[in-house]
Amino acid sequence: MRGRVLGLVLAIIGVVALGVFALDAQTPKEVVVGVIIPLTGSAPGTGQDCKVGAEFAADMINGGVKAAAGSALLGAGWNGIPSLGGAKVKLVFADSQASPEVGRAEAERLITTMKPSATMGAWHSGVTVAIAPVIERYRIPHTTVSTATELTQRGFQYLFRVGVNAHQGGEVLFQYLDWVARDGKKWNKLGQLHEDTAAGVNFANAIEEMAKARGITPALRVPYSREQANMDSEILKLKSAGIDVLVQTSYTSDGIIIRKTMRKLDYAPALIFSQGGFDDDPKFYEAMGDDANFGSKRQLWSPALSTSKPILKAINDEFRRRNGRDMNDNSVRYFTNVQVIADAINRARSAEPSAIQKAMVGTDLKAEQVLLVHGVKFDEKHDNVLAKAMVAQVLDRQLKIVFPAEAATAKPVWPIPAWSTR
Amino acid sequence: MTSVLVVDDVHASYGRFDVLRGVSLRVASGELVAVLGPNGAGKSTLLKTIAGFLAPRQGSITLDGEAIGGLRPPALLRKGIAYVMQRSSLFPKMTIQENLELGAYVRETTDEVRTDIERVLALFPRLAERRRQRAEGLSGGERRMLEIGRGLLLRPRLLLLDEPTMGLAPLVMDLIFDKILEVRATGTTVVMVEQNARRALEVSDRAYVLEQGQTRVEGRGEELLRSEAVRRAYLGSGTAGR
Amino acid sequence: MTAEIVLQSVVSGLMFGGVIALVAVGISLIWGVMDVINFAYGEYLMWAMYLTFFLYAGAGLDPLVSVPVNALVLFAAGVLTYRLVIARVMRGPIFAQLLSTFGLFVLLRYAAWLLFRPDDRQAQSLVSNGVVELRVSTGELVAFVGSVLATTALFWFLTWTKTGKALRAVAQDREAALALGIEPDRLYAIAWGISAAAAGVAGSLVSSFMYVNPLVGDVFLLPGFAAVALGGFGNVYGAFAGGLVIGVVNVTGGTLTMPKVKLALVYLVFLAVLFMRPRGLFGGRRQ
């Protein structure tokens, strides 16, 4: 009798002990999150911005950013993922080299060797399109800010778009045009100049659709390949067609060449509206000096927003202290990417990719909780229904929000002044 | 008789084909020697071997007593052997002047070369008139003259001519033979392979007849011309040329 | 489409064409002298651009100043290429020759990729940022003038020097040249050196306004070949003219039709020439 009781007690202790160990084993010390970005290639400055933005967010979530304490930002005041006993978020980076082939290979390598719980990337729409099937195949929840429409048209269950898509980004252009028209500004012809990978093509298609829906006939569309060095015929074509509202998608090197060629050939449309790319890269501003002025872009963030969101100033100041420059669209988007993933992991109470994916579907973050100007909530296609953009213009070599009025910090300059007057 | 060139029992082959199977000849300084024979006898091959385009498998070749068998063309040029190929070997897009200049390639570019060019052009007045014209615009006879003239730019010890009158009209042939005689008159030693046996024998000092890669007959030009046996075997009856 | 725009496009096309012309002359020289197509030509130009960039980044050397440096270094590289690679494959079948230069292309491109990363880099020059009356950037104008000068120097060399004449002779009749004591091997090495040096000069000249990355050779190679075909394979003077024409076809053609097809237009011209007048506009055999 005593032997059986002893045996039972030992068994219970054993099971409990096993359970304790098992529980320990189930609670990881860290959660691995993969980041695939262009650290080298044609836009290394961009990649660096994304990297420091992501690292900044991870540090905050892991408890290292005092400046965030007390704010509504998701992850502020955390010390690792709360529901996982404070497991730290660990970022691992892979370099896409701005190439779809390399990006795909690197994504696969990262997933199979580092076994991340979630991933984000790849900034270049063309690369994101290439890695999406890999993500889907390995069933890793993945957040992206790439705008290519097709990313949410192909039924990917594991890909989530945190930022604006092509339509949402282009929408603001037409709102802006309506707004300046009320001020009496006139224009004749809308044209497009875009690089010919997924980012440029998708945006141009979206603009065309939206234009036609508003009764505007786009007059000219000039796609180009980034590999060529000479943009003379492109600019001459636009100039000859009298395009005065120009929608542009370019990356850094081609953006620089195009702007220089515009100057050389004396082409200054009334408005240059870019979806972002070259004009988010500090290198563009370094190279162009004053010639960078007066271009406008779809903008997702501004330090000036801190008048309405005071926490932004503190965060930006801390970022500037660490990295020597203000946050920009790229660092902010990647910061938010990390937040969305951390939020999903926390609600899933698990580091298992499939559990995180389920939680991510139900993401519901208010604008105050993230750095972007808008919150994050996904529709059935995993687009962010809350995503919207502003318009910023480069004035005195800096991006200043000019639209909408409630966020504006400067008045727009329309039309762009002729080169001879600059 | 001082021999400039001695070819002693030379054997040479193209791959597996034995073309020269024991050829011997000697050429004295200042002589004009003809090498005759039917097609395939090895006449051109003999010149190519002397000029260094082919190495003899057996036998020796000496120039002024120095063994030269197996040396390559650039070395033989420096020893003074000028070789005019059977086929047209001018540089078509270069002028007469430039072609001649290249004939003196292995020499230092000095006034001597310039004088030699003038001398050669004096020898071939038809070329002198057109010295700045491209070689491709010349007639057959003029080309041959240019090739011979270019060979002379070497100030050669020995001038090898491979079928200089091939494909030329009879009148032009005569002109070429006249020029060859003029060249010999300047003291240049000339070995000439010819199909036109009769005319060749008429102008040369001595001649050799090759057949199947071996020397068959040797003798002075007039003797061979008058010899019945030679005439029947190699000259045909009453034919004036080929 | 006004006359002014068309004229502007022709001027721009000529500027670009000047550099293509130099590239075409470099390719054509080798083709003419030894019947070898150097597929790696664009990669020599790319390496020259990297050399220019590193001289700029490391020693502050203006790209224009590094033109002679590039010419010398690339000359040596060309001779080395000939001695180590080409001299051997020339004894082999034509496929070996084609594959060898293709192999060089792969080697040079991916070595650059590995060593230098695919980032775009650009050197800055005194002439990088100006614009001239004709609406031509100073960088382009200097590149055009530089290319014309370099090509003229090359033509002078070919026409008036002993070695230049020997080179032409070897191109026209190798055996006859040998019979005159001209050593083809030595001249082939010189030809490769000159050809590579031309790429070096071109690379330096464009560095003041173009980005270098491991893929930049493509910008020049394909128009270069089209120019060589247009000018008549092996005719270096024709190649120069062909380069100018291709430059204009590229820019003016793109402006008149659609810029996206400007490379396709170059190919169309290339194909048309090959079909209709394979000897090129300036005809003739090798020069």
Image (spheres, rainbow, N blue to C red):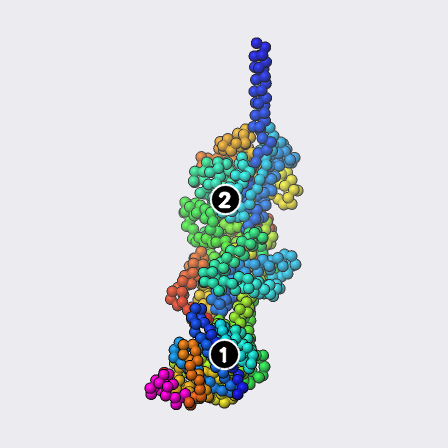
Residue at the disc numbered 2: A104
Q: Chain of mark 2?
A: A
Q: How many neighbours does mark 2 have within 10 angstroms: few (below 14), some (14-19), or many (20 or more)?
A: many
Residue A88, x across and y down, in percent: 60, 33
Residue A155, x across and y down, in percent: 43, 38
Q: Is residue C109 left or right of residue B44?
A: right
Can residue A408 be found in the magenta stretch? no
Highlighted range, magenta: B224-241
Q: Is residue C107 left or right of residue B176?
A: right
Name the image quarter holding the N terminus of chain C.
Answer: bottom left
- Please report the residue visible at 41 percent of the width from the left and 69 percent of the height from the top: C279
Determine the residue located farthest toward the top in the rendered image: A1
User: Can residue A261 be spotted in the picture?
Assistant: no
- Please report the residue visible at 40 percent of the width from the left and 84 percent of the height from the top: B197
Amino acid type of the residue tagged 1 in the rendering: Asp
Q: How many neighbours does mark 1 have within 10 angstroms: few (below 14), some (14-19), or many (20 or more)?
A: some
Q: Is residue C250 above or below residue B180?
A: above
User: Can residue A341 be spotted in the picture?
Assistant: yes
Amino acid type of the residue tagged 2 in the rendering: Arg
- Please report the residue visible at 48 percent of the width from the left and 64 percent of the height from the top: C91
Residue B199, x across and y down, in percent: 40, 87
Q: Is residue A136 above or below residue B217?
A: above
Where disc 1 sits, the SS reads strand
Which numbered disc covers residue B8?
A: 1
Where disc 2 sits, the SS reads helix
Q: Nearer the viewer, mark 1 or mark 2?
A: 1
Q: Is residue C253 left or right of residue A17?
A: left
Labels 1, 2: one chain = no
Q: In this orientation, which residue lies closer to the viewer: C19 or B10?
A: B10
- Dominant SS type (magenta): helix
